[in-house]
Amino acid sequence: MESASAKEKVLKTIREALIAKDEELLPEKYELKIDREKTKIDFPDLVFAEKFQKNGGEFILCQNGKELVEKITHFFHDKKLSSIFCNNSDLGEVLKACNVSSFDKTLISSPYDYFVMPVDAMVAETGAIVISTSSTNLENIQNHFNHIVLIALSTQAKRTEKEALSTILKNNTNSYPAQTIILRNTHFNKNLKITLFLRYVA
């Protein structure tokens, strides 16, 4: 019960920090009296969230599917004229539910404003994100998109890159993705913005 309570407190802290939009609030609030080493082992999603934001990523926590739709809708509400690329059918349906139009064909001759795609795994030790695609045309993702919008579940957080890549192998026994990309802190720069919608799963 103590571990569950600690996790709820940290998640609440993350939420409050995001609502307040205070970049200095999160590191301070993370100084809760909990076992940090135990947190790294038992709650990789919390460790990832902390590292991801320190890397410069934008983190939006969603407690359930309804809240996910609401927050995606709010995120894109003033971006109606932007070009959005999403070739994942499931996420395409989510965008439709949010009244967001997107392109689903791999036309990479000119940059898109937003690239919406699912996450394969998140790496707690570095705050990195592992994504994969069936397209072979995304050799340099920074040249094609200004802003990547990622959708993930908290259960996809893994402790190490090795564990994350092993998970992808297990989940793709029949056909491995044409391209797997690890977005490390070097990808978080002024030319490429990364926003992560993280749906919490108990």
Image (cartoon, rainbow, N blue to C red):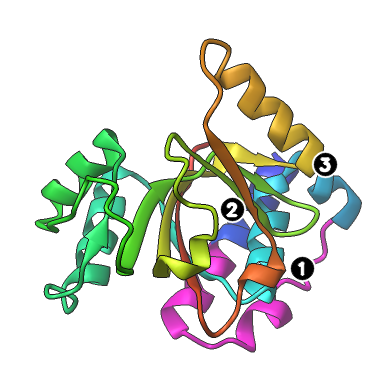
The quadrant in which residue 32 appears is bottom right
Q: What's the amino acid at mark 2?
A: Glu
Q: Say which residue label 3 marks.
A: 41
Residue shown at the point (59%, 53%) measured from the top left = 8
- Give the CA separation, mark 3 to mark 2: 16 Å
Give the mark nearer the N terminus: 3 vs 2: 2
SS at badge 2 = helix
How crowded pointer 1 is (Cα within 10 Å; few <14, some 14-19, many 20+) is rated as: few
The answer to whether residue 120 is magenta is no
Magenta highlight: main SS: helix
Q: Say which residue label 2 marks.
A: 8
In this view, which residue lies farthest toward the top? 174
Up the image or down, 36 lies above or below 201; here it is below
Give the mark nearer the N terminus: 1 vs 2: 2
SS at badge 1 = loop
Front residue of 62/82: it is 82
Q: Which residues are magenta?
A: 12-34
Up the image or down, 175 lies above or below 34; here it is above
The answer to whether residue 18 is magenta is yes
Q: What's the amino acid at mark 1?
A: Leu
Q: Say which residue label 1 marks.
A: 32
Please say if the residues under marks 1 and 2 sit with CB atoms less than 8 Å apart: no
Front residue of 5/155: it is 155
Residue shown at the point (22%, 46%) measured from the top left = 104
SS at badge 3 = helix
